[in-house]
Image (spheres, rainbow, N blue to C red):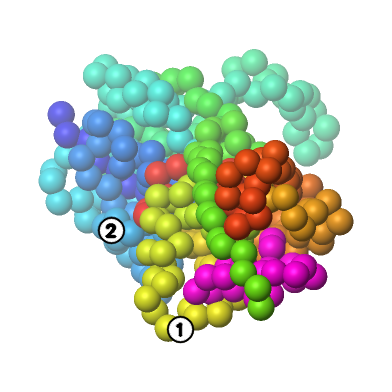
Amino acid sequence: MSVAAIIVAAGSGIRAGGALPKQFTTVAGLPMVAHSYRVLRAHPAIAEIVIVVGEGQDALARTATGEARLSLGGATRRESVRNGLAALTNRPARVLVHDAARPFVPAAVVDRLLFALDTHDGAVPVLAVADTLVSADGETVDRAPLRRVQTPQAFRRDELLAAHAAWSGPEPTDDAQMVRALGGSVALVQGDPMLDKVTYPEDFAIAEARAQAFGTWEWRSATGFDVHRLAAGEELWLGGVLIPHDRGLSGHSDADVALHALTDALLGTIAAGDIGTHFPPSDPQWKGAASHRFLTHAAGLIAARGGQVSFVDLTLICEAPKIGPHRAAMQARIAELLRLTPDRVSVKATTTEQLGFTGRGEGIAAQASATVRLPAGAPR
Ligand code: CTP
Ligand code: MG
């Protein structure tokens, strides 16, 4: 039994306000619509997905979802769903209809809905009402028989098409009420607070918090290592700070070994090669280059994936100069370059007890680690 999904994302988001319609506003590093698209696309039962977008919003939807199939929405949610149904090409037996404004879709809810379709024409996720209810004139309303209705909603496609064709009532807020009006049976399955809709401006903060619980972020860590030779007549740049010393580090760029190790750690978190991949030493334009450009380039690549650097840790390995007096300046500079608070930048130093090349003062080594969070399943 083939299953298709329609994500309606053609609303104007009037109640949410904001410069962009809410479904394209960034939540947890991704445009909101991308979250539900990603989960539905990954669901093994769903063969086809159409996202219904408003006039002129194709580019926003493309940026959000990459290769998704788009359809043009209508003036109401009902019309948008109808257009999405018309755009399905594979004559699926079953259709899920979902609001883009509900970014976090637990796969288990989709499973419950699809199972319920074995015995019903439709199925919707619902939650009991927790608060006491009163009418606007102060009459207590018995909450026991009431349920809050969410999406995705699942239907046998023929029943849903018939319900849309037959509808003549006032503008419905979901599809299940149209199917019921035509006599169809609609099962109520257990919903999930994750599915609550973003409707008002304050709902964005709730959605961000919900994203953490939903596991939308993928955490990654990676390491970097670098060595440069100490030579007379060179400036000593370490951790983005110019340090007075009798010798400096030599290399193609300014040879800031600390920033190079950090850059490689950042590139490692997105498996984007190493500093030499992006800034080949053979390329004359990087001769004498300030290494902060390498670091911010790597941070920019992470940001472009919707990621965030959470923490970096740096260890400098040398006998001299003493790092202690410069530690705070390095921490502040690296934090500035990565747009982090300094408490997210750790700078440490050690000697090698006068052993090896660092012990003999022939060069300085640095190792670094970086921890970043990336939107799980984001288009790479
Ligand atoms: N929707 C749609 N086409 C419409 C109206 C709404 O596709 N003409 C979609 C919205 O994009 C949203 C879902 O239906 O994903 C639920 O609607 P709602 O929360 O009301 O969103 P908006 O209509 O955009 O918001 P508002 O009513 O505050 O303007
Ligand atoms: Mg609306």
- Give the residue type that dot 1 points to: Gln
Please tell me which residue is depicted at 78% across the width and 47% down the height of the picture: 343
Magenta highlight on residue 343: no
Q: Is residue 176 left or right of residue 250?
A: left
Instruction: First in sequence, mark 1 or 2: give its number.
Output: 2
The residue to which callout 1 is attached is 285
Residue 324 vs 131, above or below: the answer is below
Q: Position of residue 293 (x, y in %)?
A: 57, 72
User: Which residues are the magenta region?
Assistant: 234-256
Magenta highlight on residue 246: yes
Residue 377 vs 143, above or below: the answer is below
**What secondary structure characterizes most of the magenta part?**
loop
Closer to the camera, 349 or 137? 349
Q: Is residue 326 left or right of residue 261?
A: right
The answer to which quarter of the image holds residue 76 is: bottom left
Please tell me which residue is depicted at 53% across the width and 54% down the height of the picture: 226
The quarter of the picture where the C terminus appears is: bottom left
The kind of secondary structure element at disc 2 is loop
